[in-house]
Amino acid sequence: MEYLENRELSWLKFNKRVLEEAVEPDTPLLERLSFSAIYQSNLDEFFMVRVGSLISSDKKKKHKKDKDKKDKEKNDKDDDKDEMPPSEQLDAVFTAVRRLQPSVEEAYRNNMTALAPHGYTHVTFDTATKEELSFLELYFKRELKPFISGTVVNDDLPFPFLKNKEMYVVVKLAAKKKTSIGVVPVSYENSERIVHLGNGGKRFILEEDIVLHFAHLMFKNYEVVDRAIIRVTRNASIAASGRGAEFRERMEELVAKRKKLDAVRLEISDVFSHDALEYLCKNLKLKQANVFISRIPLDLSFLHLLQEYDESPELHYVPRTPRKPACLSDTRPVFNQVKAKDMLLSYPFESMNMSFIRLLQESANDPNVTSIKITLYRLARNSKVIDALCTAAENGKDVLVMIELRARFDEANNIEWSKHLQLAGVRVIYGPKEYKAHSKLLLIKRKAQGDSYDYVTQIGTGNYNEKTAAIYTDLMLLTSDKAIAEDAEAVFNSLENGTFVEKTNKLLVSPLALRPQVLAMMDEQIDIAKNGGNGYIAAKVNSLNDKAIMAKLVEASQAGVKIELVVRGICCLIAGVKGYTENITVRSIVGRFLEHSRIFIFGADGADQKIYLGSADYMSRNTVRRVEVAVPVEDDKLRKRIRDMFRIIMRDNVKARVMLSDGSYIRDRRRERYALVSSQEYFYEEAYNKLDVKTSRQKQLKQNREKSSEAKKTVSSSKGRKKKNS
């Protein structure tokens, strides 16, 4: 349909928006380099997961044309699957990636050129001085050659295993009858990717360039006739189901096996001998279509390190640190403050350590707290969340942790954390057999007077990860509402029993009790519009591809409902298409921080307006194939705050792009006519100002108390003197 976009191509458009930040003049130079590295890191994961999945699907389709009924039923449920055959999707993806490559290379070269006045130089063997050439030869012989080895490969010799995302130098060796190549690993454990040549490390050469230049020394009995650097990307898509201890063991096996899954992409640094390249592809079981040439470094992750070599303010973003939430007092436990009123926390603008972590730590040591239940998806390497949960268990509290072992690329980390938690006496569960638990949910139970209990429930849009909480924008609601606590208890019971919540008081809980309610609330707005009212639907999500939700949005647009969507990444619904999505606007914000919060709004401002925060995107994997939780925001002040936040996001004309009716994105044109508004910077300034105002008020109150105390002392002293004189 003309108003729908292919999921994979939509994602590539998102990554193109990331790349645009690498050439944005208003972005500081060293930060531009970081966006180039982020673009490549994103693309690596895309090939490992999405392209890997498409290749697997394409192979299955070729081997089995007639699907049995069970498979058909399963595919019918996967309503985010594109109708385009996998082979066509792969062709379209490869074409789009190749079209972007010149821009990737140009961004890198232009930024390095712009950094030259600041002393940065990426040296090559063509630009190195005589002294540097002598040093590099000595460096290769002393620091690299003793630790790496060259392997000769031909039809009589086995082809070595090439590790995922590792770089190798390949050389074509002169041979009369058969193709022979040599393979040399570029790095070894603890080797330095950036080799410093001076100027505080800012003049440098990369390790792979040194190995490439001297590769012939690794094959002394052969003539090297061609050489290049290569990098292989492997499929990382693994699937597992299970619940008990055996499931964790199975996941450990799968994580180990993933390292050796099939190759899906071969990157090469330059044009390479045709027969040698064919030989590589044959042994990697890749087609020529899976080969991509790049004339800049194949791995751009080193660009993050360059930021450490120069602290000049003009090269970096203005330093920002998360503020202590102005809504929290230092003198009272967080639990008691939430009991008095609901609280909304906004990251990274407010500190997770000074709010959520503090709540956990206080609860772990509070003798009246009897239980803590939490869902964990992604965690920091040195997690204070884990420390607090272990402390709580060691203090005799009932601690239940649902930890998701299938969190992609965090599987190994979560497996180790699950073992750590169990050793501390925590009850660890793994959720439903076939469904990931992606919810961000915490329930704390505290003994009150008599036989009664108080509860604090936390529902968030982001992970309990102190590191990402400083770079992702997320929201977190803390409430003492007992109906919400009852729903949260039902969620944990279902996770423990391997079942699903079917009915709730207030929470929206997938896979059974989220999408139907969302569609029903959209229907309410459609009815309002059809009856002459102002129907309104808004959402801020990371991705949109749920076909049922998209169909309902189209229906709402056709009924005259105003729809405002902020979608950071994948958006399979094209806005502004005549007759279908004319009343829909789609905006995407890509900036300093990763937009990650999810907000659902139904209805224009007023008492009937419904606002939810949650962990689910408008993707079928979230709405019908995961356990997700969304919470209604009912406090009037917090509702106003969220509405104001959404308005500021909609006003962003610095980092926002607007989708056009052909599915492309452009910078918000309002920046040419109105004052510049960067929503992320706005929210940081707001957090700073709120804390400054609170601090100023506290200081003034302290001064007033001191003045009052001094006045009382003066009056008392005066009375004493009068009495004495009389």
Image (cartoon, grey):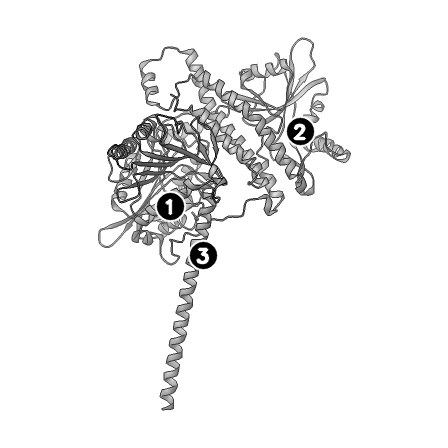
The image position of residue 451, as x and y in percent, is 22, 51
Dividing the picture into quarters, in which one does residue 576 lie?
top left
What residue is pinned by disc 2? 209
Q: For marks 2 and 1, give the CA distance.
A: 52 Å
Q: Tell us which disc is closer to us: 2 or 1.
A: 1
Check disc 1: other Cα within 10 Å, few if <14, some if 14-19, many if 20+. few
The residue depicted at 64 percent of the width and 39 percent of the height is 115
| Crowd around label 3: few <14 · some 14–19 · many ≥20 (10 Å) | some
Quadrant housing the N terminus: top left
Q: Out of 580 and 510, give the one closest to the viewer.
A: 580
Q: Is 496 or 353 nearer to us in this picture?
A: 353
Q: Quadrant of residue 423?
A: top left
700 shown above or below 635:
below
Under mark 3, the amino acid is: Asp
Q: Amino acid at mark 1?
A: Asp
Nearest to viewer (mark 3 / mark 2): 3
Judge the density around disc 2: few (<14), some (14-19), many (≥20) Cα neighbours within 10 Å.
some
In the figure, 326 relative to 310: above or below?
A: below
As helix, strand or loop, the secondary structure at mark 2 comes to helix
Identify which residue is drawn at 61% across, 39% down.
306
Quadrant where the C terminus is found in the figure: bottom left
Q: Which residue is mark 1?
A: 644
- Of label 3 and label 2, which has the lower sequence position? 2
Q: Which mark is residue 692?
A: 3
Q: Secondary structure at mark 3?
A: helix
Kind of element beneath mark 1: helix
Q: As drawn, which residue projects farthest toward the bottom?
A: 726
Q: List x then y, in percent, for residue 483.
A: 25, 44
